[in-house]
Amino acid sequence: MEMYFSFIVPVYNRPNEIKELLDSMVIMDYDKKYEIVIVEDGSTETSEDIIQTFVDKLFISYYQKPNTGPGDSRNYGMRKAKGNYFIILDSDVILPKNYLSKVDGFLNKKFVHCYGGPDDAHESFSNLQKAISYSMTSYLTTGGIRGRKNTLGKFQPRSFNMGLSKDAFQASGGFGDIHPGEDPDLTIRLWKLDYDTELIPDAKVFHKRRISWQKFYIQVNKFGLVRPILNKWHPETAKLTYWFPTLFLFYGVFSIITAFFGWWYFITFLGLYFILIFLGATLVYKNISIGFQSILAVFIQFYGYGKGFLKSYYYIHLLKKVPERQFEKLFFSK
């Protein structure tokens, strides 16, 4: 079918990020018509003035609504959109010049109702952002599940860079009220409706992620809290690999304790792992400082996620608590 793309971008108090995203859209090499739907999700610092500077350069629809979370805001934007294929982005991404032409080319050769693309750090990002990006995307940490080619099992698109047909949106009802975790939840429900998902390796975005260690910890801790909830909702998708950060924490404590008794073997392996992290990040970015910061990023990622996962597993799977009551801050009400 002839595709008319609608970008769906929820935003919450981030006008400067929207400007960078729109700047990157202005110079895209795509010559067909497309629209941009920006949904202000109850922001106190709106993007209205920024968006007004782009109305003569881009076809933008702008909506303001009460705060109901990013999932519901994306659904709102898709209901308002004029296109038949939605491209969902976070407000903190920057698009390469060829992004939309790569998506269009792929879908014309192999149409799929839902796709995802990888993310990377732009050269203009800070060293901290690059270290966090390496931690979140490296095979040594996440195994490439966030957008690398050789991943295990079906690819689960993430909502910072995700495509969804209008047909699939209407059939699934879109995103749920949980956040984070609304994107894998939608993906799994799409699979149950017999819609396929696909990775488009060349549809890369530059993703800023978090700009401080504290914000990064809060983010990955929430990722850990969410996963046992998703496993409860969709038990057929539960994997041993989701336990790895928690097992890593146990191994770290065990190796430190055994080192006090003169058994250095276990902590040596831990040290070798972090050396690989350092070398990998240093080689990728050609910067020793990023290499050292990547060690800290990986530690925070595993500690935050592993701690959150263990806590959520205890309450949800062992004590049989209701997720919406036990972790009500993870859920938005409309």
Image (cartoon, grey):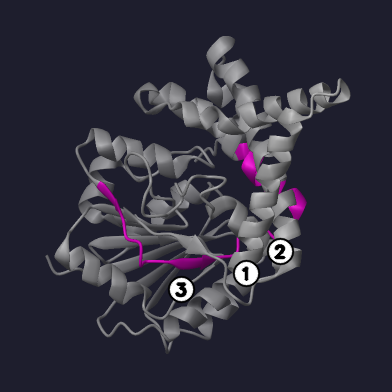
Q: Where is residue 72 in the image (x, y as percent from the top left)?
A: 45, 47
Report if the CB atoms under discs 2 and 1 are less than 8 Å apart.
yes
Regarding residue 29, the answer to whether it shows in the image is yes
Residue occupied by mark 2: 290
Q: Which residue is drawn at 23% across and 66% down?
A: 106
Residue occupied by mark 3: 95
If you read the primary sequence from the N terminus, does the residue marked by circle 3 or circle 2 appear first? Answer: 3
Mark seen at residue 259: none
Considering the numbered disc 1 on the image, is that residue within a helix, a strand or a loop?
helix
Specify start and end residues of the magenta stretch as a single range: 197-222
Amino acid type of the residue tagged 3 in the rendering = Leu
If you read the primary sequence from the N terminus, does the residue marked by circle 2 or circle 1 appear first? Answer: 1
Q: Is residue 169 left or right of residue 126?
A: left
Q: Tell me the CA gap for discs 2 and 1.
A: 7 Å
* Camera-nearest label, 3 or 2: 2
Q: Front-most of 159 and 274?
A: 274
Q: Tell me the CA gap for discs 3 and 2.
A: 23 Å
Amino acid type of the residue tagged 2 in the rendering = Ile
Q: Tell me the CA gap for discs 3 and 1.
A: 20 Å
Report if residue 105 lies within the magenta region.
Answer: no
Report if residue 201 lies within the magenta region.
Answer: yes
Q: Position of residue 167 (x, y in %)?
A: 20, 51
